Image: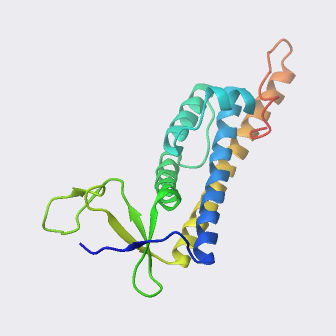
Amino acid sequence: MRSFAVRVELPQEYLAGIGAICFEWSLIERGLQLITYGLLKIGPKHGRVAVRSPRATDQMTMIRQLMELENLTTTLDLKLFSATLGRLEKMRDLVAHCIWLKGNADEYLMQDLSGNWRPNPIEPAVSKRIKPQAIPIKPENLKQVADLIRAAQKGVDQIAAELGAQRRALLDKSQRQPGMDHQLDDQNPGIS
């Protein structure tokens, strides 16, 4: 097994890539939170206390179930989108929490300690905590991940817009029918 030196400093382009990934992911998390709060008909203060910060796939399951309760739909395939978010979140977590190593010359590696892998394809899988995996990474790889997360934000925006349109249509319909309770989403700007 080859050993690498742990990095306590990284070149600026790596730092920029890591920062972009973390920043873009925070926007995804915020968008999913606002959608959830809107479906629950609560504001962000109550939502932060009641909902906390579930993983993206758990948040998407919650959103799908709340939509089903309200008979709301979206044109986006939510199961597929949830799986995409799960993969992106895993990449973000790895970049944000890994140990950075220095390889040869200008080579930088991320040390992945979660899960299992096969360092030798003919041997059984081993825990990465026992035999860590070192993944070579370049600044352009980090940029690609940030771009993928940014593209996924369009899906979050689409869900919010489609749910907002449906809720406004329901509100308009209930306002035309006297005596109907039409408290929909006064507190949450993320959906209305």
Residue in the picture at 27% in, 75% down: 2
Between 138 and 145, which is closer to the camera in this rendering? 138
Query: In the picture shown, does residue 186 fall above or below 141?
Result: above
- Looking at the picture, how far across and down is residue 81, in whole percent? 52, 51
Between 158 and 21, which is closer to the camera in this rendering? 21
Residue in the picture at 32% in, 65% down: 133
- Looking at the picture, how far across and down is residue 9, in whole percent? 55, 72
- Looking at the picture, how far across and down is residue 36, in whole percent? 64, 35
Residue located farthest toward the left when viewing the structure as drawn: 122
| Quadrant placement of the N terminus | bottom left
Query: In the picture shown, does residue 97 fall above or below 185?
Result: below
Residue in the picture at 50% in, 48% down: 82
The tally of labels here is 0
Coloration of the structure image: rainbow
Left/right placement of residue 43 relative to residue 70 reads right
Residue in the picture at 30% in, 55% down: 129
The image quarter in which residue 154 lies: bottom right
Query: In the picture shown, does residue 111 fall above or below 35?
Result: below
Residue located farthest toward the top when viewing the structure as drawn: 179
| Quadrant placement of the C terminus | top right
Between 31 and 5, which is closer to the camera in this rendering? 5
- Looking at the picture, how far across and down is residue 157, in whole percent? 69, 51
